[in-house]
Image (cartoon, rainbow, N blue to C red):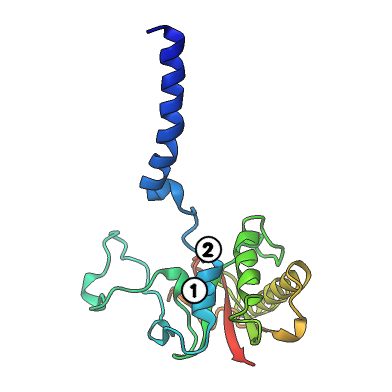
Amino acid sequence: MSLSFRASSLRGMLVLLVPALLVSLPGLAQRGAADSPTALELIQQLQPSANSGTRGIRIPAEPSASGAPDTAAAPAKPMPPPRLATTAPAGVGAASISVRFGTGSAELAPEALRSLDALGQALTSAELAQFRFRIEGHTDTVGTAEANQILSERRAATVRDYLASRHRISPDRLEILGLGESQLLVTTPDETANARNRRVQVVNLGG
């Protein structure tokens, strides 16, 4: 068997094996950001009364200084993934999305666009097109409560404007509200940076 034939056969085997490896390794095949729900996940979460058992769930506080989780306070049932937890009342269609902004600003970071594009696809889907939504801006506890309130309002407005311009969603369907640090997803002390608290929560307001 010639060397050229062996090389050709080896290349053919690699072409077949690489896709199979990618499928068998979830870490390579799946999206990298756990806090970026897909459009399908958002559709499921934002429908009224859907999966109401996951509503109003607050992520537990950070692990203790030793790094070990507080197992004594752990609930009997496993918590849903952080990207699906919200602070909305039970039975209300809602979803929390981590949206990256520049530090202390309302300018969208490039990585935020994927999250917002998934949201835009969800809100224009047949399942959700008939509903109105509230876009809530939330911050962590770094900075004063007054500054965070203003910042959350600006960020909610930025998200609404992006959805309206990029996905042609009527602004009449999108109400905005800034809540600053008043409704933390993860309970933390003052002046604590936590990415899960810097989020946008979308709440279904009905038809």
The percent position of residue 72, horizontal first and vertical second, equals 21, 74
Location of mark 1 (residue): 190
Front residue of 3 and 202:
3
Tell me residue 201's x, y (percent). Answer: 57, 78
| Residue at 50%, 86% in the rendered image | 88
Q: Quadrant of the N terminus?
A: top left
Q: Is residue 30 left or right of residue 114?
A: left
Q: Nearer the viewer, mark 1 or mark 2?
A: 2
Q: CA distance from mark 1 to mark 2?
A: 26 Å
Q: Tell me which corner region of the image, top left, top right, bottom left or bottom right, holds residue 166.
A: bottom right
Q: Secondary structure at mark 2?
A: loop
Q: Amino acid at mark 2?
A: Ser
Return the residue at label 2. 36
Q: Residues within 10 Å of mark 1 (few under 14, many from 20)?
A: few
**Image height of 197 relative to 66, above or below:** below
For mark 1, give the secondary structure: loop
**Residue at (52% x, 82% y) in the render:** 94
Specify the farthest residue to the top. 2
User: Residue 153 at what x, y percent from top left?
Assistant: 69, 79
Which is nearer the N-term, disc 1 or disc 2?
2
- Residue toward you, 147 or 29: 29
Q: Is residue 10 visible?
A: yes
Which residue type does callout 1 highlight? Asp
Identify the residue at image location x=23%, y=78%. Answer: 76
Q: Within the image, what quadrant is residue 146 found in?
A: bottom right
